[in-house]
Image (cartoon, rainbow, N blue to C red):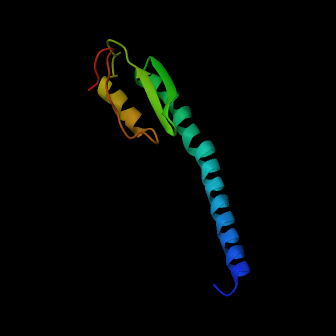
Amino acid sequence: MRDQPKVFARACLVVGAGLLAWALIGAVIGMFLFIPAALQRKEQLRDFGATRISVAEHRPGQLVLTVGIPDSFAEGHSQDRLKEQILRLPGVVDLRFCTFHTCD
């Protein structure tokens, strides 16, 4: 390829365009498939005793799901069952229980 710089430039352009198209496809899939799946399923947490549910972006690309819990759960519901449901949401990698003063 040293003898033919135009061929090398074209090859780089084709490879770069292919990678850019692949990244665009991945971004579209992420925006319309994975993130909405987590956001639509968060409302199901109310069935397990959640009182308040909100989603905010903590850092670029890192969403934080905040779930309020009651002081006492209704019959058949518990904090452990709610934690299990939260951990089943797609994309959840960490779960911390926080009060107004501390987090565990």
Quarter of the image holding residue 97?
Answer: top left
Judged left or right of residue 27, residue 75 is: left
**Quadrant where the C terminus is found in the figure:** top left
Q: Is residue 16 above or below residue 61?
A: below
Residue at left offset 51%, top offset 27%: 55
Q: Is residue 13 above or below residue 23?
A: below
- x and y percentages locating residue 84 in the rendered image: 35, 34
Q: Residue furthest left?
A: 104
- x and y percentages locating residue 14 in the rendered image: 69, 70
Quarter of the image holding residue 103?
Answer: top left
Residue at left offset 67%, top offset 87%: 3
Q: Residue furthest top?
A: 71
User: For this rendering, which residue is in front, 58 or 28?
Assistant: 58
Q: Is residue 67 above or below residue 100?
A: below
Q: Is residue 16 above or below residue 80?
A: below
Residue at left offset 65%, top offset 65%: 16
Residue at left offset 29%, top offset 15%: 101
Judged left or right of residue 59, residue 104 is: left
**Quadrant where the N terminus is found in the figure:** bottom right
Q: How many marks?
A: 0
- x and y percentages locating residue 87 in the rendered image: 38, 37
User: For this rendering, which residue is in front, 86 or 92?
Assistant: 92
Q: Residue furthest bottom?
A: 3
